[in-house]
Image (spheres, grey):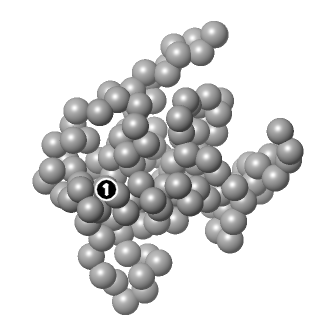
Amino acid sequence: MSGQKDDWILLALKDRPLDRLHLMKALFLTWHRSGRNIPNYFAFEPYLYGPCSFDAYRVLDAMSKEQLITQPSEPLPRWAKFYLTEKGKRAAAEVRYFERSALREQVVSHSFILECAQPAFLMRRQTCHAIQFELALPS
């Protein structure tokens, strides 16, 4: 499993479960902090709660069917957390990422992804609005 979209989700869920909002923000901030230079990554667009990749939802569905993740039901479905199954934990343990750019070689670690998913980090309104504005600009 190298360079696949599901690898990024496995890394994000490796140490703790995340609901869909925090998972989406962790994926987006991973891409944004990497200089937006991750080949074959999720495509994001502005949406209700910030940047959203509908492709990520398709990958989550596929991962659920492959029994890599599970999402127990919750009274408020939008806040139901995704958990790695035993199969998912084994797959996550095998994931390694190295991103190359012209200026540097950088390791994108799962601890960075978890840092991005922290509520205090996500609540920096100016950063989130600036990022969302950048997304809305034509490229």
* Residue 67 in sight in this render: yes
From the viewer's perspective, is residue 69 above or below residue 80? above
* Residue 23 in sight in this render: no
Left-right relation of 79 to 87:
right
Q: Residue at x 30, y 81 (%)?
A: 73
Q: Residue at x 47, y 61 (%)?
A: 57
Looking at the rendering, which quadrant does residue 64 occupy?
A: bottom left
Furthest residue in direction bottom, as rendered? 75
Q: Quadrant of the C terminus?
A: top right
Picture coordinates of residue 8, whole percent (x, y):
41, 42
**Circle 1 sits on which residue?**
63
Looking at the rendering, which quadrant does residue 49 occupy?
A: bottom right
From the viewer's perspective, is residue 104 above or below residue 17? above
Q: Amino acid at mark 1?
A: Met
Furthest residue in direction right, as rendered? 138
Picture coordinates of residue 109, whole percent (x, y):
40, 32
Q: Residue at x 64, y 10 (%)?
A: 103
Secondary structure state at the residue bearing disc 1 = helix
